[in-house]
Image: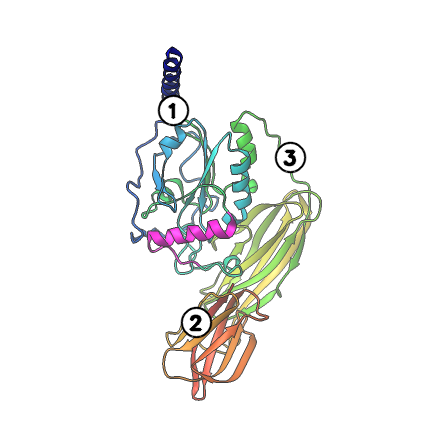
């Protein structure tokens, strides 16, 4: 009997010691930024200011190394809460990563997020915060200030509007988790973007937070080597291991994947594209420079590689790892009101060896005749379901019109498919040989054009 009582006593003492240890380790954070109770799915997501000439490294925005962070409570897809002070109370540093599905850079870093979760879980806790979309199809970017989607997303069938409700944010987060295979916990930013307002404004920001609640290191772009950010070196430093880096010694080749001159419709984004390829046996630091930018009035151009700059950005550097290929887009934003053209002289070079250099003139031309149609906006007299689609969609007129002919055009204005003698109010369109991407659909009846519609094939 005495031994049983002694056993109970030891269990109680052990529990008290354990509880005391956690309480003593509790970080003292700045006042909470929210979000309080679990938001309702119907809660409206707050708006945001459109940035003007932002620092696209996102390193100059708070928070900084040594700063004490504010406390916050956020919720996952199941409605389970996470309080930052409580999480730090377990005595482990926390890696925070900003997430959104429309940032190609975020999608490209998923393997690293998952690797930290799998191999550093004894040293750190990693969590993701799902925030505003970087490239919403229907709105301005909260990060760069440019409007609409980017080709890297459209080519993968990723077309997402900015979140109107908390439910929209959850749905987008679920798509990212499912489609990209995230293995670590993900929590939703609050309806008024409380986390982004305090820890942003980058689309792919990352932090290591000490167990005492101070910032150990901040990445404006998570793990962006060209900006001096190496997450594995930072994690090693956190646990007392010296990281010895070295300058990249590889080289790369350049290959245009479109013509150097691309024709599109006025008001659309016209892309000249290329691949930067590294098979040299070592990593290479690549500099991209827009050396000349000769554009008609109302036009802009922007560099897009592993991240997309706004039109003000003229130089960009990134690490091209050995054995990898990075696709490049030069986005020409054409004026909607008139035909025009743009030209940019682009320089692609090894930052450590200027003899490994490519100088390329890229051109875009906008013509109303490019699509052989006078309008490309969505038409209410045509419905396409589903849109986007994978293998097949159903097209119908919303009135009494009978479809006699259907034409499909790619974004360069080329007619890629025609179907005649349909003679029906509905028609099924099969993907067939069409590659994923954006197309323009034109329906005609015996009396003329019924309407036109954008379609997206995934």
What residue did someone put label 3 on?
246
Q: Main secondary structure of the magenta part?
A: helix
Check the image and report above or below for 107 versus 334.
Answer: above
Secondary structure state at the residue bearing disc 3: loop
To which residue does mark 1 refer?
22
- Which range is magenta? 160-181
Nearer the camera: disc 3 or disc 1: 1
Q: Nearer the viewer, mark 2 or mark 3?
A: 2
Q: Which mark is residue 384?
A: 2
Q: Is residue 262 left or right of residue 311?
A: right
Q: Residue at x 56, y 54 (%)?
A: 290
Q: Quadrant location of the N terminus?
A: top left
Q: Position of residue 430 (x, y in %)?
A: 53, 72
What percent of the width, then of the height, locates residue 379?
39, 74
Q: Position of residue 37 (x, y in %)?
A: 28, 42
Mark with earlier residue (3, 1): 1
């Amino acid at each position: 009997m005495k031994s049983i009582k002694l056993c109970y006593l030891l269990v109680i003492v052990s529990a008290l010691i354990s509880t005391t240890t956690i309480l003593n380790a509790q970080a003292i954070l700045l006042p909470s930024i929210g979000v309080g109770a679990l938001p309702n799915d119907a809660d409206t997501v707050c708006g945001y200011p459109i940035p003007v000439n932002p620092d696209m490294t996102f390193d100059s925005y708070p928070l900084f190394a040594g700063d004490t962070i504010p406390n916050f409570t956020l919720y996952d897809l199941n409605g389970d809460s996470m309080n930052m002070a409580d999480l730090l109370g377990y005595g482990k540093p926390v890696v925070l990563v900003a997430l959104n599905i429309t940032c190609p850079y975020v999608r490209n870093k998923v393997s690293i997020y998952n690797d930290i979760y799998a191999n550093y879980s004894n040293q750190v806790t990693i969590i993701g915060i799902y925030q505003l979309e970087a490239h919403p199809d229907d709105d301005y970017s909260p990060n760069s200030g440019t409007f609409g989607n980017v080709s890297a997303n459209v080519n993968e069938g990723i077309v997402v509007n900015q979140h109107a409700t908390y439910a929209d944010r959850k749905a987008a987060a679920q798509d990212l988790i499912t489609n990209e295979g995230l293995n670590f916990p993900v929590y939703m930013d609050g309806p008024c973007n409380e986390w982004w307002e305090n820890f942003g404004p980058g689309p792919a920001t990352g932090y290591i937070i000490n167990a005492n609640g101070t910032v150990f290191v901040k990445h404006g772009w998570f793990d962006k080597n060209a900006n001096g950010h190496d997450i594995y070196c930072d994690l090693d430093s956190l646990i007392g291991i010296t990281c010895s880096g070295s300058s990249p010694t590889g080289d790369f080749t350049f290959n245009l994947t479109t013509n150097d001159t691309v024709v599109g419709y006025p008001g659309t984004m016209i892309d000249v594209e290329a691949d930067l390829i590294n098979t040299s046996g070592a990593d290479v630091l690549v500099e991209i420079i827009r050396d000349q930018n000769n554009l008609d009035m109302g036009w802009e151009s922007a560099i897009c590689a592993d991240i997309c700059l706004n039109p003000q950005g003229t130089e960009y550097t990134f690490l091209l790892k050995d054995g990898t290929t990075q696709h490049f887009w030069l986005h020409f934003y054409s004026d909607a009101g008139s035909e025009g053209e743009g030209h940019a002289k682009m320089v692609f070079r090894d930052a450590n060896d200027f003899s490994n250099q490519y100088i390329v003139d890229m051109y875009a031309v906008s013509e109303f005749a490019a699509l052989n149609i006078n309008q490309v906006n969505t038409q209410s007299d045509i419905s396409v379901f589903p849109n986007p689609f994978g293998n097949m969609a159903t097209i119908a007129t919303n009135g009494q019109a009978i479809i006699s002919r259907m034409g499909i055009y790619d974004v360069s204005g080329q007619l890629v498919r025609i179907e005649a003698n349909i003679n029906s109010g509905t028609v099924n369109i099969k993907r067939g040989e069409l590659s994923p991407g954006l197309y323009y659909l034109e329906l005609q009846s015996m009396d003329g054009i019924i309407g036109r519609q954008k379609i997206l094939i995934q």
